Image (cartoon, rainbow, N blue to C red):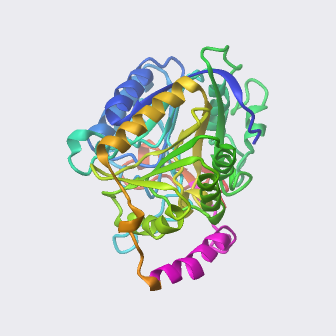
Amino acid sequence: MNNDWLPGNRIRLLENGEAFYPRVFEAIRAAREEVLIETFILFDDKVGRQLRDVLIDVASRGVRVRLTVDGYGSPGLAGEFADGLLEAGVVMQVFDPKPMLFGMRRNLLRRLHRKLVVIDGHLAFIGGINYSADHLADFGPGAKQDYSAEVEGPIVAMMHAFARGQSGAPRGRWLPLRARFGRKRGQSAAAPEPEQAVGPSQAMFVLRDNDSHPNDIEREYRRAIRSARKDIVIANAYFFPGYGLLRDLRRAARRGVKVSLIMQGEPDMPIAKLAARTLYQYLMGAGVQIHEYCERPLHGKVAVVDDEWATIGSSNLDPLSLTLNLEANLVIRCRQFNRELRASLDRLRDRHCVEVREDLFQYPRLLRFLVRSLLLPTLRRLPSWVSWLPEHRPRIDRWTAQQAGSEPASDESSIQRQEAA
C-alpha cells in the first residue's frame, strides 16, 4: 500500500449514532450509482432495519448495492431480514461464515472488523460505529460512546478502489491496494478519477490485514507518538497494545509531552478493563495520565497528536485489531478537524471521566512482579507468536434469493474467496 498523504479533503466528525445514522442514511438515499458497505456488526434491530429499508429503496431504483458483514459479528441475518434485500437486488455477502457449534460461534479469529461506506465513489464514511441500536443513547446504560467521519475529496477515490476490489480479487488472494487502485477504467475494481480539492485536510487511508499490511496502522500510531512535541490524546475502547507502542508512550511522557489516555470505566467486556489496568502503573510511572470513562461503554478508536495528526477508524489498540483482524483507519492532518476532535475528547475527559491516580492505584507486589517479568516480555513477542495460530482462508459467501431462508450460498459459482491469513 502506498501510504502517501492526499491533500484537498473535507472531513466531518460524527459523534455517536445520533449524528452518524441520519447522515449516512441520507447519503445512501441520495446515491445515484453505487453503495458499498462493510461492517462488523449488523443486527436485526431498529437501526439494522432502517439500514435495510434504505438499501432496499435505493436498490429498487437501480443503484448497485453491495453489503458485506462479518460472519462472527453479524450472526442470524438470513431468512426474513435478507429476503427483501435480495429481492431488491442488493448483493449481500458474509465474511467467513461458519455454522454454530453447540449454540456458540466458533469463528472468532481474523475477523472483518472494518466499518466503511463508499457512495458513488465520491463520498465515504469510516469509523468505529456499527449498525446496531446500542450506538444510540436511548438504548440505556449500555449505549456506546463512539466516533465516525464523513469524507469527501481525493482520498475517497482510494477508499472506493479498495472497497470495490474486495469483490474483484482473484480467487484465494487479496489484491494489494496499489494494484486495485491502478486498474484501467472499466475493470471490476476500477477507481474513479481523483476528486478535485474540496477542503483543507490531508488524509491517508491505512489498512491492517494478514497479508501485505500486517502492522500499517500500528506503525502510523508509533510515528505520530514519536514525533509528538506537546500532547497526545488517545481514546481507545480495548487498550492492550504491543510493547513498542507502550515504550513510545512512556518515552514521549518522559521527554515532556503530555500523554493522556481515555480508557473504559464501564466496559461492555469486563476483561478489556482488567487487561488495560495491568498496564496502568507501568505507564503512569513515566508520567502518562490515564482517565476512565464511566458514563457508558467507550467504543471509540481515535487519537489526536499536537493538533497536527489524528486518526479515526475501526482499529482498537489490542492484539485482535493489531495482529489478527482486518481493519481500516483514516489518518488526518487538519487543524480544524483535529481541534474539533480534541475538543470532543476534552469534554469527555473533563465531564465524564475519572482520573486514575497513581498513589491510589498500586498493584500488589506479586502482580507488579508478574507484569514486569511476564506480561511485558510477552507483549514484546506477541506479534511473532500470533503467526503460530491456526491459519485458514476465510471466504466471502454470497447469499442468493433461493437460499435466503437458510444459510449463505456455498457453491463454487457464488463464493468469492479472499486470503486473509
Along the viewing direction, whichever of 349 and 297 lies nearer the viewer = 349
Residue 78 in the image: state x and y as whole percent: 37, 50
At horizontal 62% and vertical 27% (from top left) the residue drawn is: 156
- In this picture, is 411 found above or below 313? below
Lateral position of residue 380 relative to residue 410, left or right = right
Q: Residue 385: say if magenta.
A: yes
At horizontal 51% and vertical 17% (from top left) the residue drawn is: 32
Q: Residue 147: say if magenta.
A: no
Lateral position of residue 68 relative to residue 246, left or right = left
Tally of marks: 0
Residue interval drawn in magenta = 367-395
| Residue 129, image quadrant | top left
Residue 62 in the image: state x and y as whole percent: 48, 21
Q: Is residue 16 visible?
A: yes
At horizontal 55% and vertical 44% (from top left) the residue drawn is: 232
Q: Is residue 191 visible?
A: no
Characterize the magenta stretch by its predominant secondary structure: helix
Q: Quadrant of the N terminus?
A: top right
